[in-house]
Every structure is written in structure tokens, then in C-alpha cells.
Image (cartoon, rainbow, N blue to C red):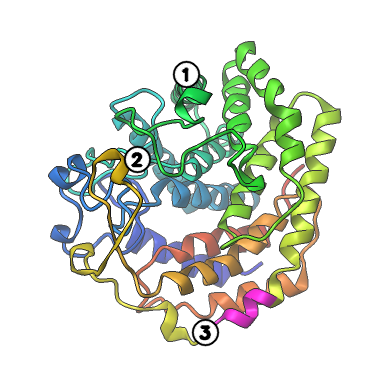
Amino acid sequence: MHENKIAQAFQYIEKTLISSKTNIIYDHNIHKDPNEWPTPDECESSFPNPSGYGTGMEDGMISGGTMLDGCILLYENAHDKKAADMARRIVSGMLGCAEAAKDEGFIPRALSPIDGKSHYIESSKDQFTLFVFGMHRYYNSSLCSEAEKIKIRDIAVKIAKRAEKNVNAENGYDILCENGAKTINAQMWGDSLGNHEYLRLPMIYLFAWEVSGIKHFLDLYTALREEAINRSLPMTSYWHLYAVHQMQLSARLCYDADPDKQWRDKILELMKAVNKYILSQTDRIRSLLKDKSAYNMPQAPFRECLMNETPHKKNNLPCQSPLRPDAEDYWTLQDAAVISIIYRMVPGTPIDPDALRLLYEAFDKIDFKLHQRSLPVHFFDALCRTSFNEKF
């Protein structure tokens, strides 16, 4: 077990990324000047864009769901009390996001650390995926209290009802922004999806059934199941591997919760195909790694960044996204971590020595005295997944 690396990543996240006000993990150091964060007025006016891209409030649910997975593994296998405490904090923060929504079933990306409630109006299928997966993991863990189960059940049903109401041909199969406008990346069904996206809507319905027992949601899931599995293959090429990470998480939830063993077996075969692909990527990702300095750059306040136009004009909203010069390197280093998360999601999969070497090499690129980004979240989960064998 890589105790030292796990502890190093955990301490960084605890001290640097999670807010004591919101219990949300932010995209970079939360303890910098509060004036560097989006104000409530900026969130309300969608400045600089409706998703909060580049502001530090972009990926709270992705980081939360990923960190939660690692904390549950660490607690259930090593009885680590700090991991249990962190898991409870993260769940409270993620549920707080859901409760702050002005439209039922909408999941904000993060809440403003200034007032603890303001947020941007656009989420994404990725944020919904990690929220639902994280809640699934926590709900089924030994950590989840009855009071937490009631809250999780309530929001799971609200998300499923939102999906049933909004994800239709008239809306372009979009789960929609908080204000009812169409999004740029929360289409949950239809012919325009990539193969990695077809289990996202089914997982929402299946989780709602899993926690509520309402058969209607199981019926919605089973109506989509065969097509979703069939359209998930063959594997193709991906800009970065976070897409495959979310593909595997959605498949894993369906594998866990589907009541039909024959379909569980088919989902398992899909997950194994994902693994074959992902383990073929280790050499490519290793060849892209750079010197340490590429991954430990200071993060400028978003208002001081150069801006890039994003496709939001259709909503008549601001459409500028702050450019981060380390963005491409950030995704590459994250890829090195998610490979180990992905392949270890498959029940019974042994440690892959080459993927583990890549994980170590990439982890050592992080200088914890200088680093300001949320990359250690994915490394923490990957290290936990390669330390423990789940009880399947």
C-alpha cells in the first residue's frame, strides 16, 4: 500500500482545496484572496460564462465524487477515521449544492465560496455523472447514516424526474440549465452522443430506483438499457481520458445495481472492453509527460486571464472562458491517474504493473509546495484503488 503518497495527497486536498464554508472541493487553492473568486453578482449574471469555466468553480461535483470514492475505499479497508470524516464533509457539500438549486433536480457545479449559495446556471452530464456515482458509492457504504440516506433518496428522485421531464426530442435530449435554457454539454441521449456517454441517463434512472424502490424508474432504465450498452462500443479515440473514466463509472453503477444477472454480465463485458482500451494507453500518456514545472504553475485570478470565446451566444449570455496556460498538461497528468481508476473499477482486475509505474511517475511530477490545482484528487482515488481489493 502506498501510505505515504495517499497521505500526501489527502493532506494537500484537506488543507488546500476543500472549503470550510461549503465543504466543496474547488479547482484550485481555496485559501487565496476571496476577491479572486466569482462574486454572487457574477454568478447571477453568468460572468464570464454560464458554466463558471476557468473560475475555480467548474468541477466541484467531479472532484467530489472522485474523492468520495477514494475515501470510502480508505475507510472500509484501513478504518481510517480521517477518510470517514472527509467523506461526510464531501457528501454534505455535494448535497448542499443540490439543495441550493433553484430548479428541482438541477446539480450546480459548485457554490460560491463567498456566500456559500450562489452558483452558475449551467451544469453538465459529467457533473451529474460524478454526483450520482458518488452518492451511489456512499449510500451503499457503511458510512451512510439513515438521515443521509433520506436526503440522497430525495435528490436522486428529483434528478430522475428532471431527466424524465427534460430529456426529450423537443429539448434536444438536454437536461437543461437551471433557468430552462439549453446547455452546451448536458445532452443525455440521442444520436449526437459519443459512445462513452450512453449509460449516463440510464444510470440516473437506475440509481433513483435503487434508493427509492419506485418501479417506474427501473422501467425507464430497462427501456434504455439494451440500446445504451450496444451504443457504448466500439471504443474510439478520446481527447482526454476523463471521458472514459466517466464511461466506466456509469457502467460500474449499472453493474452494481441492475437486478438482472444476464444484463450485469453484459455490462461486465463492456467494462472489460473499456479496460482493454485504457491499458493500451499507458505508453502514449507516458510519452507526453513533461518536466515538473509544467504541472506546478501559479494560478492567476480568472479576471486576469486571457479570455477565449465559448459557444454560449445562443443563450444571449457572456461567452468568455479564462485561458489557463497549463490546461493541456493538466489533462495529460490527470490521464495518468484515471487509467488506474478505470481499470480497477472492474471486479477482480489485478494490479497492472505498467499502469502502476505510470501512476507513480506522474504523481512524482506534483510539487506539493507549489501545486495549486485539483489534480491530487484523482491521484488520491487512483492510489486508493490500487491499494485495496474491493469486497465484491
Residue 306 in magenta stretch = no
| Residue annotated with mark 1 | 165
Q: Residue at x 27, y 52 (%)?
A: 319
Magenta span: predominant SS is helix
Query: Label 3 crowding class (10 Å Cα cut-off): few <14, some 14-19, many 20+?
Result: some
| Residue annotated with mark 3 | 290
What are the residue bounds of the magenta stretch? 284-290
| Distance from Cα at disc 2 to Cα at disc 1 | 17 Å
Note whether residue 163 is visible: no
Looking at the image, the residue that sits furthest to the top is: 215
Q: Please provide percent x and percent y for residue 5.
A: 55, 71
Q: Earlier in the sequence, mark 3 or mark 1?
A: 1
State the quadrant of the N terminus.
bottom right
Residue 288 in magenta stretch = yes
| Residue annotated with mark 2 | 122
Q: Secondary structure at mark 2?
A: loop
Q: Earlier in the sequence, mark 2 or mark 3?
A: 2
